[in-house]
Each structure stands twice: as structure tokens, then as C-alpha cells.
Amino acid sequence: MSHHVYVIECSDGSLYTGYTTDVDRRVREHNAGEGAKYTRGRTPVELRYVETFADKGAALSREHAIKRLSRAAKESLLGE
């Protein structure tokens, strides 16, 4: 099973970072208002970035590291 860290852009321009084992399903959940509480009022969301890992621990560590980045550093990661 693959583990993924993803970054989505919300309709208000904010960035949300999360972890999942199925990126497409998770983005659909966010857009349906069934995702994280943060994204519920900020739909639609757009997938901007994904990293894939072999184990959950590595993915969760990377998620935490991305969440600690500044907005500018996140934008650099996204290639903006």
C-alpha cells in the first residue's frame, strides 16, 4: 500500500496539507464537504502537490514537515 502526502489549494487561496492512502478519493471527499473541517467551507479544492512513500511513518513525518513550512516555502515546493 502506498502512503501519500498532498497539498490542496482551497477556493480562498489557502493551502491545506494532508495524508491519505488514496489521493483521488480524498480530494473528492474534500470537495463533497466530507474532508477535514478546515476545508469544508473552502470548497472547491484543487490538488496541487503529491509525494508518495512506502511506509506510513515516513509520510506522516513529511506531512508534519510541510505543515511547518512558511507560505513562501510551500509555494516554492509547489513550483510557483
Image (cartoon, rainbow, N blue to C red):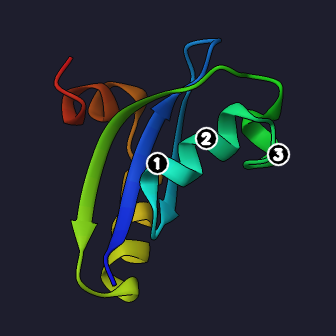
Label 1, label 2: how far apart the Cα atoms are: 6 Å
The residue sitting at 25% across, 57% down in the picture is 51
- Report x, y in % for residue 62: 33, 67
Residue 67: x and y in percent read: 47, 51
Which residue has dot 1 on it? 24
Q: Quadrant of residue 75?
A: top left
Residue assigned mark 3: 37
Residue marked by disc 2:
28
Secondary structure of the residue carrying numbered label 2: helix
Residue 13's x, y, as percent? 55, 14
Question: What's under tag 2, amino acid-wise?
Answer: Arg
- Seen at 67% across and 40% down, the residue is 30
Q: Closest to the observer: 60 or 34? A: 34
- Residue type at mark 1: give it: Asp
Question: Splitting the image into 4 quarters, where does residue 53 fall?
Answer: bottom left
Please identify the quadrant where the C terminus is shown: top left
Residue 73 locus on image (x, y percent): 28, 34
Q: Nearer the viewer, residue 42 or 15?
A: 42
Mark 3 vs mark 1, CA separation in Å: 18 Å
Query: The residue under label 3 is which amino acid type?
Result: Lys
Q: Which secondary structure, mark 1?
A: helix
